[in-house]
Image: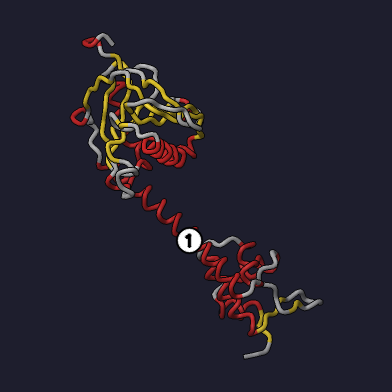
């Protein structure tokens, strides 16, 4: 093998196209060993073959070019950490893709008739402790888990008695405008001392059409869709926060597949006076 390889030979050896090699030269990723001043031809050394092979595999894993540059010049420990971080990011993206695929399958398999799974519920005014804030939609799940933990800690610290199912109230603005008022509450009995974000409230009464969502709340929009479609077609839907009641939640089990959430849509019921 000659000491210097033409771009064509280097392309055949590394399975990187000539066009790709020219691009990598332009962005400073795999630069030729030297370029002929008169002809402009690019020549590569045999020692560059392993580097090109590494670059090809990192690009196959969608690592950005600036990150690959950092990998190529880093010390072994730093290089391994950079690659590990990128692989972790890919695994997270793969998990999100799998979740989206499963959710899409659920949509395709779900029956159009949700009425059999709907119940009507009359909710009385309920004393509770709560955390209330304006929350961005993208932050809602993380905020929700943190608020739940803080509320349960307050129940224990103040020796309160939980008198009902933990729940939440979510303004329509969260879904319509990506930010809105959210409330997480625990019904309690006993004297409540306001500390930090935790305040005593009275959860208002409501008439609800209710559907149970099983599993992680990441795909709760599917249940919201079925419930909202039913409520707007068959009930008198009214303005008001959407409700969730956490029959089984992270406080009961860290296994999200076992969570159970009753989702409530506010309605007007003539037979109860509204």
Task: Give residue 245's position: percent from left, percent from top.
Answer: 31, 32
Q: Is residue 225 visible?
A: no
Q: Residue at x 70, y 65 (%)?
A: 26
Q: Is residue 166 visible?
A: yes
In this rendering, the answer to whether 55 lies above or below 181 is: below
Task: Give residue 5's position: percent from left, percent from top.
Answer: 66, 83
Q: Residue at x 45, y 54 (%)?
A: 93
Task: Give residue 208's position: percent from left, percent from top.
Answer: 28, 22
In this rendering, the answer to whether 50 lies above or below 267 is: below
Q: Single out the residue that lies furthest toward the bottom.
A: 1
In this rendering, the answer to whether 189 lies above or below 153 is: above
- Helix, strand or loop for disc 1: helix
Q: Which residue is mark 1?
A: 88
Left or right side of 181 for 102 = left
Q: 47 or 263, which lies in front?
A: 263
Q: 7 or 106, which lies in front?
A: 106
Quadrant of the frame with the C terminus: top left
Task: Give residue 145's position: percent from left, percent from top.
Answer: 41, 41
Displayed quadrant of residue 211: top left
In this rendering, the answer to whether 33 lies above or below 129 is: below
Q: 59 or 204, which lies in front?
A: 204
Q: Residue at x 61, y 63 (%)?
A: 67
Displayed quadrant of residue 164: top left
């Amino acid at each position: 093998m000659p000491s210097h390889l033409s771009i064509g030979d280097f392309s055949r050896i590394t399975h990187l196209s000539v066009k790709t090699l020219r691009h990598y030269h332009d962005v400073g990723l795999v630069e030729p060993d030297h370029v002929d001043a008169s002809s402009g031809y690019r020549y590569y050394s045999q020692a560059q073959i392993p580097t090109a092979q590494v670059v090809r595999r990192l690009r196959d894993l969608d690592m950005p070019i600036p990150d690959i540059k950092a990998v190529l010049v880093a010390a072994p420990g730093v290089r391994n950490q950079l690659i590990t971080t990128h692989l972790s990011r890919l695994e997270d993206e793969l998990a999100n893709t799998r979740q989206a695929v499963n959710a899409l399958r659920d949509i395709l398999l779900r029956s159009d008739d949700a009425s059999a799974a709907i119940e009507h519920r009359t909710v009385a005014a309920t004393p509770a402790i709560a955390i209330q804030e304006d929350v961005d939609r993208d932050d809602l799940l993380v905020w929700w888990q943190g608020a739940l933990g803080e509320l349960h800690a307050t129940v224990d610290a103040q020796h309160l008695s939980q008198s009902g199912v933990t729940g939440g109230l979510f303004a329509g603005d969260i879904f319509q405008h990506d930010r809105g008022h959210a409330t997480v509450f625990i019904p309690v009995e006993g004297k409540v001392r306001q500390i930090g974000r935790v305040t005593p409230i009275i959860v208002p009464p409501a008439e609800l059409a209710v559907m149970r969502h099983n599993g992680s709340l990441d795909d709760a929009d599917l249940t919201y869709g079925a419930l909202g479609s039913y409520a707007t077609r068959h009930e008198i839907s009214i303005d008001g926060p959407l409700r969730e009641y956490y029959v089984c939640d992270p406080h009961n089990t860290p296994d999200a597949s076992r969570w159970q959430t009753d989702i409530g849509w506010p309605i007007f019921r003539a037979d109860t006076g509204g």
